Image: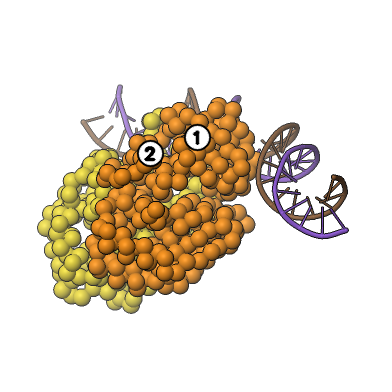
Chain colours: A orange, B yellow, C purple, D brown
Amino acid sequence: MRNPWTMKMEQFTAFSDMERRRLDELIRARQDQHAPKDDIIADGAHSGLCHVVLSGLACRYKLLPDGGRQIMAFLIPGDLCDAEIFILKVMDHGVAAITPTVTALIPADDMKALLRETSSLGEALWWGTMTDLGVLRERIVDEGRRDAYVRIAHLFYEMLVRYRMVELTDGDSFEFPITQTDLADATGLTPAHANRTLQKLRADRLIELSGGVLTVLDPARLKQAAHFNGEYLHLDRVHDRASVGQRAGDLV
Amino acid sequence: MRNPWTMKMEQFTAFSDMERRRLDELIRARQDQHAPKDDIIADGAHSGLCHVVLSGLACRYKLLPDGGRQIMAFLIPGDLCDAEIFILKVMDHGVAAITPTVTALIPADDMKALLRETSSLGEALWWGTMTDLGVLRERIVDEGRRDAYVRIAHLFYEMLVRYRMVELTDGDSFEFPITQTDLADATGLTPAHANRTLQKLRADRLIELSGGVLTVLDPARLKQAAHFNGEYLHLDRVHDRASVGQRAGDLV
DNA sequence: CGGCAGGTTGAGCGGATTCAAATACAGTGG
DNA sequence: CCACTGTATTTGAATCCGCTCAACCTGCCG
């Protein structure tokens, strides 16, 4: 059982056994637990530590002067929370746990040392960052030009692909325990309207969402409803892995 | 007169004279001109060349199945169009010229060679990428939680800061020759509504926009109206430069 | 002069919001 | 086992921001 960080990066690059062991060491050395609603990284912080989500669910967010909140990204196992730590002084947003979340803490210096040793990691980090950029751009299209129905459908389909990358899907189901308030904050809707739209998706038999588990009933139809085109996730370089499950690349 | 790329990166890092000369060489070696509406980089392309905007105005965009367009970012002199070229197979969006635009073409291999020579450039590229991420996140807040008035005000104030970084402002004026259609596509509004909102901004004496020149009449009030907090641009590490003009950092 | 792109304006519509109240549900303590 | 509590979800009605679609204007250029 590989750790989700390595697993995600192997969507793009191939590590040697030695590299994999080094990554496992980094992940195992120091970990932290976070309760729901707690900040994993506070806005404005700079700890010198890199955070990788190992289990649970977290989000990047910004608080607004009027008390509102905008969730800019969901972070699932395998995701790096703060690539900016290498270069920037402070975080320009916060990262908070949504469910109980375990993170690995990696000293920035250790990471830099490893980056000098192995170019695969550098490439994988660069790939991860470029993919994050792609995801953000897609979200801008969502909020700018797609209505609530398509927007939520798009988010759900993207999450299906991302969870499959780290082999946390069970068929077309996966644990995604967000509240409708979270969903509203992520999509730029009000909770009331997110609720109504969710009901339409359920009525159309595209998804089921209850008990914190999201089930995609018809991936092909959801993909179509979401106007989803997965190029922005850049899974086209996935190399063959001895994976028992389905491959994320098949969804894009 | 330094080139705008170097100038922008020097907001963050300090180059030696030798590094500056090498950068100038790279910029001068090969350039290209682009007419308005022409693609500088097509969606799906992969040329092995990096593009840096030297003059003019361009945008990142995606076309939608219904014929709509979403502009995800404006690219001004000094901006790198395609950092993804180092690692990804294809572009997941297009870059098009808005006005006649001159770009420098840098072979990815030359760039990589220079990256090995000097760590300053690597840091500056990483900083640029992290800043791009920050800008995208801020745009998500714009479209998700701010109304048309604040959204446009925010865009204009951000552009003021960015233009000042590369010393292309004349006081609080700068050339920003976008059509209202472009503005609408960038903010997720319709041209009609962008027009009405623009008129409110003019009526409130916050800005003037005509003849392709945007003048910020009252930076402090515009900043307030835009709910602008410039942390996400990460100008806090700006080192002292012998700049004759105003400093972008003063605006954030 | 005609054509065209960009800008402006108006009327009517609708998706999403606001605000409120009702309902479901899990956890907790009596 | 059942009230009690707090949180999440659901529903309703009124309202509004921004959209649609259309017409009209302006300046520029061939």
Ranked by sequence position, the earlier of labels 1 and 2 is 1
As helix, strand or loop, the secondary structure at mark 1 comes to strand
User: What amino acid is at disc 2?
Assistant: Gln
Viewer-proximal residue among A186 and C29: C29
Where, by quadrant of the figure, is residue A231 drawn?
top left
Give the x, y percent position of residue B130.
37, 60
Residue A149 visible (yes or no): no
**Rendered-image quadrant of the N terminus of chain B:** bottom left
As helix, strand or loop, the secondary structure at mark 2 comes to loop
Residue sitting at the far left: B29
- Checking the image for residue A216, the label placed there is 1
User: What amino acid is at disc 1?
Assistant: Val
Give the x, y percent position of residue B247.
37, 70
Which residue corresponds to the image point at 53% horizontal and 45% vertical from the top-left?
A175
Can you identify the residue that label 2 sits on? Answer: A246
Viewer-proximal residue among B64 and B172: B64
Q: In the visual, does A207 lie left or right of A87?
A: right
Which residue corresponds to the image point at 34% horizontal and 71% vertical from the top-left?
A110
